[in-house]
Image: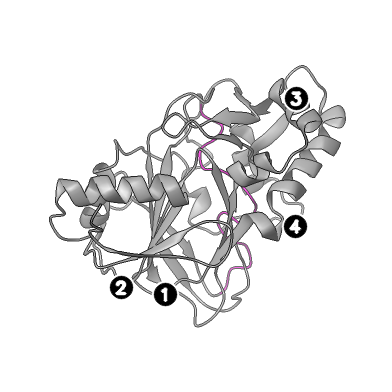
Amino acid sequence: MRELFELNPLPGALGAEVRGVDLGADIADDVIDRLRQRWLEHRVLFFRGQELNPGQLAEFGRRFGPLEHYPFVEPLPDHPEVIPVIKEPDERANFGGGWHTDLVYRPEPSAATMLHAVEVPARGGDTLFADGVLAFEALSDRMRALLDGLRVVYHVAHVRRHVHDRSDGESTYSRSMPARAASAEGPASPAHHPVVRTHPETGHRSLYFSREHTERFESMTIAESRPLLDWLEAHVTQPVFTTRFHWESGSLAFWDNRCVSHCALNDYAGERRHMHRITIAGDAPF
């Protein structure tokens, strides 16, 4: 098949950089179809030099599915699906600073996330991505059999806890996070998802796991769950399963939450980082 754009796989376990596509333009359907194929193959796509306004970002995202509303951050005016993710120079904590999968605490978590860089620090602020498919394939048969029967309990209360429960009074997220956290509506009951998930489009099996939002394993206590949960996070986030992306102004990352987890590094004290984020609706994991 003739390639409709230039695609260069990144060093690391997953991800590829796309060149030759203006995301703010009227992109042809065959280009969108090919981007989706390459996205499913590489799990995360990266674009450089995309000077998108919030409306253009949302319009590009809608080409891949309906957009969601995020309950814990005030969206941009006139763009209810686009949230600003900002860390100011005087803030110590950052947004998304632990390994996680977006909105996993919902019964139907996000299928995908797009993050667009508006302003980035002079250095630092990279994002790490981990491939749950490769992590699953590296397991022994015995461990696969054990995990196949387990479901993880996720609860939205963990988000509020990160915002409010610091003993020193400082939020563990930047000020952009708690704008609506106290009054935001979330799922009334925990979500229960399999730790081994089958991708609805590719059929690949992966470790589907978000330590930041985890309460415990289903039918197990928190104390009983903790050792295996800690081991899972350590396994999935090994360097052999990860890729590190360095942001520039105008960069955009598009990742598959159904098999990829991520972590935003907080190594740019005294500098400002400003991003715009959208998430694409998904379905119940199986």
Type of residue at label 2?
A: Gly
Q: Is residue 238 above or below residue 216?
A: below
The answer to whether marks 2 and 1 mark residues whose Cβ atoms lie closer than 8 Å is yes
Label 2 to label 1, Cα distance in Å? 8 Å
Badge 3 crowding class, 10 Å Cα cut-off, few under 14, some 14 to 19, many 20 or more, is: few
Taking depth in this image into account, of 70 and 49 the one nearest to the observer is: 49
Q: Position of residue 121 (x, y in %)?
A: 49, 77
Mark nearest the camera among 2 and 4 is: 2
- Based on the picture, tell me whether residue 33 belongs to the magenta stretch: no
Q: Quadrant of the C terminus?
A: top right
Label 2 to label 3, Cα distance in Å? 45 Å
Would residue 110 be found to the left or right of residue 92 on screen?
left
What residue is at 62 percent from the left and 33 percent from the top? 157
Q: Position of residue 214 (x, y in %)?
A: 68, 35
The answer to whether marks 2 and 3 mark residues whose Cβ atoms lie closer than 8 Å is no
What residue is at 19 percent from the left and 61 percent from the top? 24
Residue at image mark 4: 168
Type of residue at label 3?
A: Ala
Residue at image mark 2: 49
Would residue 26 be found to the left or right of residue 89 on screen?
left
Earlier residue among tags 2 and 1:
2
Type of residue at label 1?
A: Glu
Earlier residue among tags 2 and 3:
2
Badge 2 crowding class, 10 Å Cα cut-off, few under 14, some 14 to 19, many 20 or more, is: some
What residue is at 33 percent from the left and 50 percent from the top? 82
